[in-house]
């Protein structure tokens, strides 16, 4: 994996007697309105012996102060970037400290529900999948409204199909689960929101089959703190193109060529 962004370890992690089954990485940037509620939901959620790594990515609101109140809680590790580096950099920093057999990612808002963790984790633990994505668009009830964000995701899905031959319904989902050593082997380099397409591109290039499962989702808009914008959409397109043709770091194996569109 590429070198992680420099970070301050706010609380030295205590080595567990055995590796936890799951590590949850939570990058946080200016989420004073939601971070405490989210952390409580994660702590109370499935897998009570999980490791929870919180990476404060240079927050300038009350987030650092609120996080201090969680220091010392069992299973938590707190890291901080002194300046904002972006979600990709925060995730790379967190992966360097992950001790769980599997790792998944959790945004610090309340859009995603930690109660869905078993849907992502159990197929991998049973040996039925290598990579599991939680799709916001597979839920049988309560379809999401058509917004510019949904249209953007549909466009990214189409690019993944055309470039990599993989049919996905939610390339941009936050909920992605893999074994931790597989995450580390991808050599992630993203700094910001280009993290998701880099993950998808490299998994496809490695020939890893991505299984999608339905999850619940409660969207928020820009007024409520959503940070992704059109510049990130442009970066997503560039990232999918870049990793379709670029050499994968640390992988000398012959690259598997994507199947033609419509074949997978």
Image: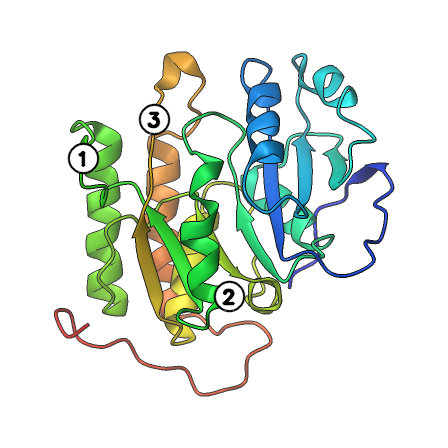
Residue 210 x %, y %: 35, 64
The residue at 70%/46% (across/down) is 5
Is residue 259 placed above or below 75 in the rendered structure? below
Q: Is residue 148 visible?
A: yes
Q: Which mark is in front, 3 or 2?
A: 2
Lower position in the chain sequence, tag 3 or tag 1: 1
- Looking at the image, residue 78 sits to the left or right of residue 48; the answer is right
Q: Quadrant of the C terminus?
A: bottom left
Is residue 141 placed above or below 254 in the rendered structure? above
The residue that disc 3 covers is: 218
Residue 207 x %, y %: 38, 76
Q: Which mark is in front, 3 or 1?
A: 1
The residue that disc 2 covers is: 125
Q: Report, in whole angstroms, how far the alpha carbon at label 3 lies from the one at label 2.
A: 27 Å
Label 3 crowding class (10 Å Cα cut-off): few <14, some 14-19, many 20+? Answer: few
Name the element at disc 3: loop
Name the element at disc 2: helix
Q: Report, in whole angstroms, how far the alpha carbon at label 3 lies from the one at label 1.
A: 13 Å
The residue at 35%/57% (across/down) is 240
Is residue 91 placed above or below 243 in the rendered structure? above
| Mark linked to residue 141 | 1
Name the element at disc 1: loop
Q: Quadrant of the N terminus?
A: bottom right
Residue 199 x %, y %: 45, 58
Residue 67 x %, y %: 72, 23
């Amino acid at each position: 994996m590429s070198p992680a962004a420099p970070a301050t370890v706010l609380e030295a992690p205590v080595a567990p007697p055995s590796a936890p089954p799951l590590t949850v990485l939570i990058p946080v940037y200016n989420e004073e309105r939601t971070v405490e509620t989210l952390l409580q939901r994660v702590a109370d959620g499935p897998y009570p012996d999980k490791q929870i790594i919180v990476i404060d990515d240079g927050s300038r609101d009350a987030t650092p102060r609120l996080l201090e109140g969680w220091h010392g809680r069992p299973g938590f590790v707190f890291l901080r970037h002194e300046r904002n580096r972006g979600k990709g950099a925060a995730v790379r920093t967190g992966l360097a400290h992950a001790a769980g057999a599997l790792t998944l990612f959790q945004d610090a808002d309340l859009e995603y529900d930690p109660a869905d963790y078993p849907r992502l984790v159990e197929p991998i633990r049973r040996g039925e999948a290598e990579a599991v994505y939680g799709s916001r668009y597979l839920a049988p009830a309560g379809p999401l409204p058509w917004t510019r964000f949904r249209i953007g995701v549909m466009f990214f899905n189409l690019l993944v199909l055309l470039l990599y031959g993989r049919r996905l319904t939610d390339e941009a989902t936050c909920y992605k689960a893999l074994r931790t050593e597989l995450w580390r082997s991808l050599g992630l380099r993203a700094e910001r929101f280009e993290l998701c397409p880099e993950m998808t591109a490299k998994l496809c290039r490695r020939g890893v089959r991505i299984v999608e499962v339905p999850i619940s989702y409660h969207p928020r808009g820009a007024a409520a703190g959503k940070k992704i914008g059109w510049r990130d959409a442009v970066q997503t397109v560039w990232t999918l193109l870049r990793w379709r043709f670029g050499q994968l770091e640390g992988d000398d194996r012959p690259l598997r060529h994507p199947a033609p569109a419509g074949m997978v």
